[in-house]
Amino acid sequence: MRTTINEYAIARSDAGPYGITVGKDGALWYTEQKGNRIGRITAKGEMNSFPIPTSDAGAMSIVSDQSGDLWFTEYKANKIGRMSMNGLFTEYELPSANSSPFGITEGPDGTIWFTEMNSGRIGRLTKSGEITEFDLPIQKAFPSFITLGSDGALWFTENQSNRIGRITTKGEITAYPIPNPNSGPVGITSGPDGALWFVQINGNKVGRITISGEMNEFVIPTPGARPHAIISGKKGDLWFTEWGANQIGRITTQGVTSEYEIPTKNAEPHGIAVCPEGNVWFAEECNQIARLMIVSE
């Protein structure tokens, strides 16, 4: 497979883009964890952004819901943010102080689910603003990314307790230990095969877990790749960022891995998204948004 990568610089030198998602308008929306803004970039590379009302909010992960609103976690401000595509903001403060919300996704019933890294909880937010929190069995589990599974439950990584967690919409929690010790799971996504796929930032592997809890792991070719985020592709594959190796990785559902070098050195790729056309977009903390296009198979 031959690919090409284009990078688009953000005008502000201190933006620090982190999370990225595909909007209902076809554009890519991203968080600026340092610039304190929500940014937007079109397929042509045209950019604009909107300032978050709370200063130094520490915006991290972002998701677009079925209605088109953008939801994002405010790690430092202890809030969940909501923004319409025309730039109107609403913020919801979490009941528990210093919870450090991080991962976020939409549930099967249209509610918003998120992780609380410091408090060891999973949160649920209704569109009317009601927040419910669920304690994890291990308080210092450090829940990170979260995604909707093919079984209608929410699946998340427990970075410090080395487990993959599952919570039903009723709040019932199950956890599955990862065979590789101290693997440091971070990103997780629902794969094209109905299983959950996740990356191990310390273990240097991509993991796969079925909805019944069966797990296997695939070694990433580059040592010290430090994979961070992962997303399902359009051709029965998955794509992930390699923060440590400055690469973008691709893995098939059979476990075959390919890697693609990012043009800018020390780009620090984090969040990743795949647009309807199949192009892979990712946020580079070095103040750039990048697009990987498949030129030929």
Image (cartoon, grey):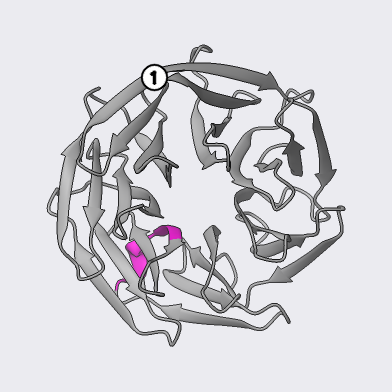
Q: Residue at x 58, y 29 (%)?
A: 285
Give the residue pinned by disc 1: 260
Q: Residue at x 51, y 80 (%)?
A: 133
Kind of residue sitting beneath label 1 = Tyr
**Image location (x, y in percent) of residue 211:** 26, 68
Callout 1: helix, strand or loop? strand
Residue with the most extreme left position: 179
Q: Quadrant of residue 258?
A: top left
Image quarter of the N terminus? top left
Q: Residue at x 21, y 66 (%)?
A: 176
| Left or right placement of residue 279 versus residue 86 in this view | left
Residue 141 among magenta residues: yes
**Image location (x, y in percent) of residue 161:** 26, 60
Q: Is residue 218 above or below residue 138?
A: above
Image quarter of the C terminus? top left
**Image location (x, y in percent) of residue 142:** 38, 60
Depth order, front residue of 12/84: 84
**Image location (x, y in percent) of residue 223:** 23, 24
| Span highlighted in magenta in the image | 138-146
| Left or right placement of residue 47 versus residue 23 in this view | right
Q: Is residue 81 above or below residue 220?
A: below
Residue 289 among magenta residues: no
